[in-house]
Image: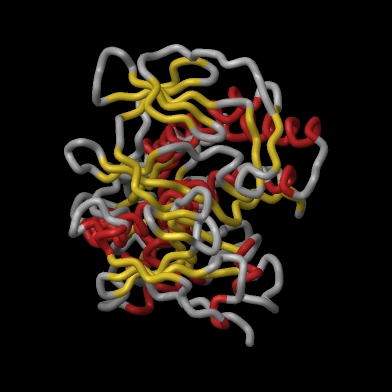
Amino acid sequence: MTRKTEKPAGGDLIAEGKTKIIRATGQDPEKVLILSKDDITAGDGAKHDLIEGKAAFATRTTCNVFRILKACGLPVAFDEQIDETTFLAPRCKMLPYEVVVRREAHGSYLKRIPGLAKGHLFPKLLVEFFLKTNGRKWKEHDLLCDDPLMEYSDGTIALYEPSKPVHAQKPFLVLQGGEVFGRPDEWKLFAEITKVARRAFLILEKSWQIEGRTLVDFKVEFGLTKKGELLLADVIDNDSWRVLENGAYIDKQAYRDGGKLDDVAGKYRRVAGITDGFRLPVQQVVIWRGSDKDDVSPVVKSLDQLCGGSAEAARLNVTTATCSIHKEPVRGLNELHRLVQQVPDTVIIAFIGRSNGAGPTLAAATTVPVITVPASFKDFPEDVWSSLRTPSNVPVTTVLEPSNAALAALEILALRNPQLHMLLREQLEERLVNSIPV
């Protein structure tokens, strides 16, 4: 296929791939311009078409994705969008492997594990590394395939064919680490790469869930800046993942499966529009106490720990309200309504000493979740009954441990918050295991 060559804006050409161009900025040597192309390919380039507008959809999607990842504190190679097909990024030396994260079994994974049902769920995210190659060559080595599956162990990298059952094959080539890594200790980056890739997936997983779709896997790449900083780099667009909408793919898989170009273009346009909505919400936890003598520090400490060290760093507002509902019910309810009016996406933790009826009273007067913690339960266990035996239309949740109350509050907010979902799910998956039927 031939087409008219256009010189995009920017400085000297640094690299050009199947779907993007990287140019120097002409001003800052530590920055680059990444320009998307209208090309779409499959089968390592065996299938190739042009979709008018794809470049703009791809850039829009990538910028939307990188903005939310960056807002969540991930190290991302993204500065700003320049125009509809270009964004500015830190210049990186790209690492020679792709990282695939899977929540469900799709694509080549089904070939590696024959008999596994399509869509098999992995409670703990599965992370795989693939060596990036072209023309079935790696330096002086001839390969059986491009982009082989990598397994690193004791200084060597074993390569496997990704489209064949992995348990029925031996590595077709074993490379020394120095033949792949740019520096002797690069293998130490694998743990950090895995962590960042998992976190990126979890953020995007919840972002798609909020929009009513399901992210099942994605492919990302990493690079190192001149100072040695590891960044999630390149692009994350509709070529990078599989996303399901009502059980059907709305990503590049539709093109791989032979979909009409107009239909594929429509999916790319829709995905760009959906990712416009990726954002972090404004949320709040209100810790309600009866008086300033009630020590709420156990709840505050637990919130900080669960948020990775600081609730503030996780962009979560934590507010302490002090009012005895028994003594000043009117002032208390006015304060409740004011706080919820300011931040409607709120969860209330009533951490109460003697005034155990405050939690149920607050729950009866608002539509936001209320979790009550009878602070004096250990000394006066009978106090818990005022929080358990409540009238109708009083949907209070009673939790004895402050740390569990904090976790419950964050789990409620995480239903609508990609960053909190990432923080909580990451901790949960440390103790989960995947099982595959045999």
**Relative to the observer, which residue lies in front, 323 or 306?**
306
Looking at the image, which is closer to me, 333 or 42? 42
- Camera-side residue: 408 or 294? 408
Quadrant location of the C terminus?
bottom right
Q: Where residue 263 appears, x then y in whole percent?
A: 80, 35
The answer to whether residue 173 is left or right of residue 223 is right
The residue lying at 45 percent from left, 51 percent from top is 132
Examine the rendered structure and indicate whether residue 206 appears above or below residue 52: below
Q: Could you say which quadrant of the image residue 37 lies in? A: top right
From the viewer's side, name the closer residue of 346 and 268.
Answer: 268
**In the image, what residue occupies the spot 37% across and 59% down?**
194
Residue appearing at x 43%, y 57% in the figure: 131
Determine if residue 330 is in view: no
The relative height of residue 220 versus residue 39 in the rendered view (above or below) is below
- Rendered location of residue 378, percent (x, y): 28, 78
Q: Quadrant of residue 382?
A: bottom left
